[in-house]
Image: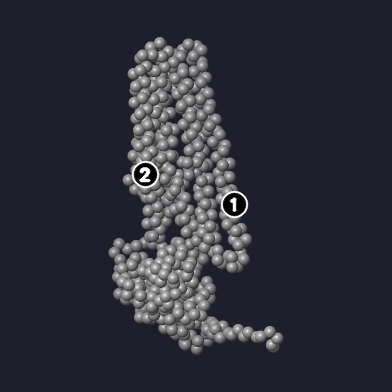
């Protein structure tokens, strides 16, 4: 396997595919080739130097020594320049280019793709896989080129010196190639499995870190540590399996290389004792043979570790960037109104069907509440309206146009989403609100904050609008984060609003504030509200009861209560629950 095939068909092709034709790897390859060829020539020129020395003409060696010095200088300068440039190519172009492409592709993926498992895999890709890429130009490529080109240069020289010793040097090459290919296949397969386990560990670590408050308050730390420990143990087993799997083919490869070196030594001894070779040639060939064997042995290690790991990570980046995105129209359609409709929509996660042939009309400017038992498909339906995914069957319409014809950008320009799980960036309150519309004025931000009841929160904060909220908004309460999220949505001023279970876990004070903010955000907007609390259902123009992915009841709240169906039972149960009172009795009373 020649250097061009090994590198041009692997690193160069994949690197160019990952970061474009300007990855810089071709320039690195040229630099490493110059370094390796110059180094090989330096060793090859030992033959004429030793000949003139053995023949008693030391003065004739000066010219050859000058050529050796020139080649050594060329090799050193090329090595320095290529190594110096390798950091820029590795960090800025390969790793940086891969991260930019990963980031750009992640931004184009449907929001429904971002599950905990996929986020863990993406985290491992960004933090681990791309970091390996920066070692390709300066370390892995340099060693591979040196391990292939330098021995080839030496072999060409030995062929002109004594074809018999050259034949001895290449006699074991076929066996070496077989051993190397086997070593590479084993290492590649094991590194793929190791990468999967690394992704699982990343997912568990992220989950463990995010759930600290819940785990500690629930006393589940030991159990959670067990889940993380299982992932770590699986990762450890993969590492041990990798080492065990590559140990035998690595030893076999080294044995073949050692056997080839022994064959050269044997041939040299045979030719020397029978007087059929010049002593200087024998000494030179023996030195060159050792130089031939050293980098070839190192190539075995690279094939098992560096090359296989780099190729695995390059392919992971490739696979991620090939993750299907939602189809986007060449020319985005413009909806004629802000009404939303579902027409015979079906959708499922894998083999699990969640929405079944569902049809629904959400009038423009009206509020539609979705209620039903857990797992009925309420959140899934709301997310289909936001085009987190495309339905498996049927269509979601906005202004009588299919969302697929409007495109994701067009949909998100018209939709504002406020969910129970609010994420805030580790920045100021003002910066988090401004995400709704970055070019908004101070007056517009303040008006949105007032409508969302956020101004009360800002007045209590130590630095007001400039107070940092912490990672994920951890320095604010759940209700305060909700108000920031509502203010952000109000500032966006989108004609369609999706509200997902916003008051399901709030205290009474925050619930009153959030309900008031909801009234502001749904006013004159097309609103789809996934609700559990009666406070958000009472104001609905339309209520649909969802069960097993089907709408079983629909109408106004009063109509559904009068009908005496499942919604009426739910209404009665929650009304009774909201009327519950806790009576405290003094000690000794009955």
Residue neighbourhood size for the residue with mark 2, other residues' Cα within 10 Å, grouped as few (<14), some (14–19), many (≥20): many
Query: Which color scheme did the rendering employ for the protein?
Result: one colour
Residue 251 image offset from top left, x and y in percent: 56, 34
Q: Residue at x 50, y 35 (%)?
A: 300
The earlier-in-sequence mark between 2 and 1 is 2
Q: Would you name the residue on which mark 1 appears?
A: 233
- In front: label 2 or label 1: 2
* Quarter containing the C terminus: bottom right
Q: Residue at x 51, y 26 (%)?
A: 260
| Residue 242 at least partly seen | yes
Return the mark for residue 400.
none
In terms of depth relative to the viewer, which is nearer, 114 or 360? 114
Residue neighbourhood size for the residue with mark 1, other residues' Cα within 10 Å, grouped as few (<14), some (14–19), many (≥20): some
Where, by quadrant of the figure, is residue 67 drawn? top left
Q: Residue at x 60, y 62 (%)?
A: 221
Residue 357 image offset from top left, x and y in percent: 45, 72
* Quarter containing the N terminus: top left
In terms of depth relative to the viewer, which is nearer, 505 or 353? 505
Q: Would you name the residue on which mark 2 appears?
A: 89
Q: Residue at x 49, y 64 (%)?
A: 349
Residue 311 image offset from top left, x and y in percent: 45, 44
Asked if disc 2 and disc 1 are in contact, CB closer than 8 Å, the reply is no
**In the image, residue 48 above or below residue 519:** above
| Residue 552 at least partly seen | no
SS for tag 1? helix
**In the image, residue 551 above or below residue 91:** below
Say how many tags the image has.
Answer: 2
Where, by quadrant of the figure, is residue 2 drawn? top left
Q: CA distance from mark 2 to mark 1?
A: 36 Å
SS for tag 2? helix
Where, by quadrant of the figure, is residue 150 drawn? top left
Residue 356 image offset from top left, x and y in percent: 47, 71
């Amino acid at each position: 396997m020649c250097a061009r095939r090994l590198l041009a068909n692997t690193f160069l092709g994949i690197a160019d595919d990952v970061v474009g034709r300007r990855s810089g790897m071709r320039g690195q390859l040229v630099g490493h080739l110059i370094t390796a060829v110059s180094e090989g020539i330096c060793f090859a020129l030992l033959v004429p130097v030793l000949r003139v020395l053995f023949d008693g003409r030391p003065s004739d060696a000066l010219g050859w020594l000058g050529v050796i010095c020139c080649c050594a200088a060329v090799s050193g300068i090329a090595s320095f320049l290529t190594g110096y440039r390798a950091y820029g190519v590795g960090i800025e172009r390969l790793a940086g280019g891969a991260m930019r492409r990963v980031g750009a592709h992640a931004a184009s993926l449907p929001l429904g793709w971002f599950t905990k498992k996929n986020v863990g895999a993406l985290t491992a890709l960004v933090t681990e896989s791309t970091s390996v890429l920066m070692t390709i130009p300066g370390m892995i490529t340099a060693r591979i080129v040196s391990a292939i080109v330098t021995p080839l240069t030496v072999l060409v020289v030995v062929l002109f010196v004594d074809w018999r010793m050259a034949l001895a040097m290449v006699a074991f090459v076929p066996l070496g190639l077989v051993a190397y290919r086997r070593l590479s296949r084993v290492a590649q397969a094991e590194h793929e499995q190791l990468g999967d386990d690394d992704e699982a560990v990343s997912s568990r670590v992220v989950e463990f870190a995010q759930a600290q408050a819940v785990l500690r308050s629930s006393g589940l730390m030991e159990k959670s540590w067990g889940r993380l420990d299982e992932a770590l143990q699986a990762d450890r087993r993969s590492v041990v399996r990798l080492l065990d799997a590559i140990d035998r083919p690595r030893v076999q490869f080294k044995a073949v290389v050692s056997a080839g070196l022994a064959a050269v030594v044997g041939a040299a001894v045979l030719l020397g004792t029978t007087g059929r070779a010049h002593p200087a040639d024998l000494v030179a060939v023996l030195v060159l043979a050792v130089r031939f064997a050293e980098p070839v042995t190192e190539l075995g290690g690279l094939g098992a570790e560096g090359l296989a790991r780099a190729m695995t990570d390059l392919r992971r980046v490739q696979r991620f960037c090939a993750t299907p995105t939602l189809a986007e129209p060449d020319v985005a359609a413009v909806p004629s109104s802000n009404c939303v409709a579902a027409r015979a929509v079906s959708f499922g996660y894998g083999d699990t069907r969640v929405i079944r042939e569902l049809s629904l009309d959400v009038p423009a400017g009206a509020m539609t509440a979705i209620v039903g038992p857990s797992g009925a498909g309420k959140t899934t339906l709301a997310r289909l309206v936001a085009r987190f995914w495309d339905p498996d069957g049927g269509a979601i319409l906005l202004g009588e146009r299919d969302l697929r014809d409007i495109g994701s950008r067009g949909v998100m320009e018209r939709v504002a989403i406020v969910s129970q799980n609010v994420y805030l960036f580790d920045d100021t309150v003002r910066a988090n609100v401004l995400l709704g519309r970055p070019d908004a004025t101070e007056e517009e931000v303040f008006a949105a904050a007032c409508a969302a009841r956020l101004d009360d929160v800002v007045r209590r904060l130590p630095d007001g609008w400039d107070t940092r909220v912490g990672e994920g908004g951890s320095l604010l309460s759940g209700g305060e984060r909700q108000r920031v999220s509502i203010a952000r949505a109000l500032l966006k001023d989108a004609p369609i609003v999706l509200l997902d279970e916003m008051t399901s876990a709030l205290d009474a004070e925050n619930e009153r504030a959030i309900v008031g903010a909801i009234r502001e955000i749904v006013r004159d907007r097309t609103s789809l509200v996934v609700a559990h609390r009666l406070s958000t259902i009472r104001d609905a123009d339309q209520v649909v009861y969802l069960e097993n992915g089907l709408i079983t009841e629909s109408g106004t709240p009063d109509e559904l209560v009068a009908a005496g169906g499942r919604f009426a039972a739910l209404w009665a149960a929650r009304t009774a629950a909201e009327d519950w009172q806790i009576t405290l009795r003094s000690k000794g009373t009955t």
